[in-house]
Amino acid sequence: IDYLLLMKERSHLKIVCETDPLTGLLNRRGMETYIRSRHYQWTVIACIFDIDDFKKYNDTYGHEAGDRCLLEVTECLGNMVEGRDCIVMRYGGEEFVALFFSDDVQYVMLCVDECMRDLAARRLKSGEGATHGYVTLSGGLAVSGEHPRRMDDYYKLIAEADAKLYAAKESGKQQVLY
């Protein structure tokens, strides 16, 4: 019985260490564990998302409402990856990363568009002074030239997508640039 209790506790601790407590999504450690356990041998498409004007949302409605907004976005992202060879993680604050284990950019862009439409349909009012009247996402998308071999290759790919995210923010938000 002690052994079973120890295994149950170990399993619980693994989950706690690898997931974000608010959203239940993977965190960076969870992403690394997932990737290492699967040994992917194909191209990866990274897409990083950021909630536009999230600070204004929190300033207008408070942090509890901000948490509910994060959960709504999490649900949209979860819908986007459901049934697909993809993972999504909370990367920090109001940033999320989706890794698609595919080389089909058009397919990934359709998935991303579906997510953006899902969020738009929820009509979550944005904060005072926000660029758009409803909560929106901006994003950047990057494609690995070949399958990443080391974890550092994944982080470089995410950094490349992040640079495109900033370009999307600077050119009006509510868009994903590739």
Image (cartoon, rainbow, N blue to C red):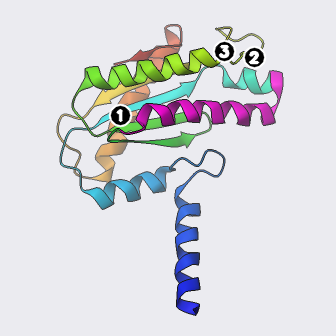
Q: Is residue 141 magenta?
A: no
First in sequence: mark 2 vs mark 1: 1
Determine the image quadrant of residue 146. top left
- Residue 19 x, y percent position in the rendering: 55, 54
Q: Secondary structure at mark 3?
A: loop
Q: Is residue 7 left or right of residue 122?
A: left
Q: Amino acid at mark 1?
A: Ala
**Which residue is painted at 26% across and 53% down in the image?**
150
Task: Compare marks 3 and 1 and give the one earlier in the sequence.
Answer: 1
Q: Secondary structure at mark 1?
A: strand
Neighbours of disc 2 within 10 Å: few (<14), some (14-19), many (20+): many
Name the residue located 32 percent from the left edge and 59 percent from the top edge.
36
Q: Could one spot residue 135 in this view of the protein?
A: no
Which residue was labeled with disc 3? Answer: 123
144 or 117: nearer the viewer: 117
- How far across and down, in percent of the image, does residue 115 sit? 48, 23
Q: CA distance from mark 2 to mark 3?
A: 12 Å
Q: Which residues are magenta?
A: 60-83
Q: Is residue 158 visible?
A: yes
Q: Are marks 2 and 1 in contact (CB under 8 Å)?
A: no
Q: Residue at x 66, y 19 (%)?
A: 53
Residue 124 location in percent, x, y?
Answer: 69, 18
Residue under label 1: 46
Which label was assigned to residue 155?
Answer: none
Residue 66 lies in magenta, yes or no?
A: yes
Rendered view: 45 above or below 52 = below
Q: Which residue is mark 2?
A: 127
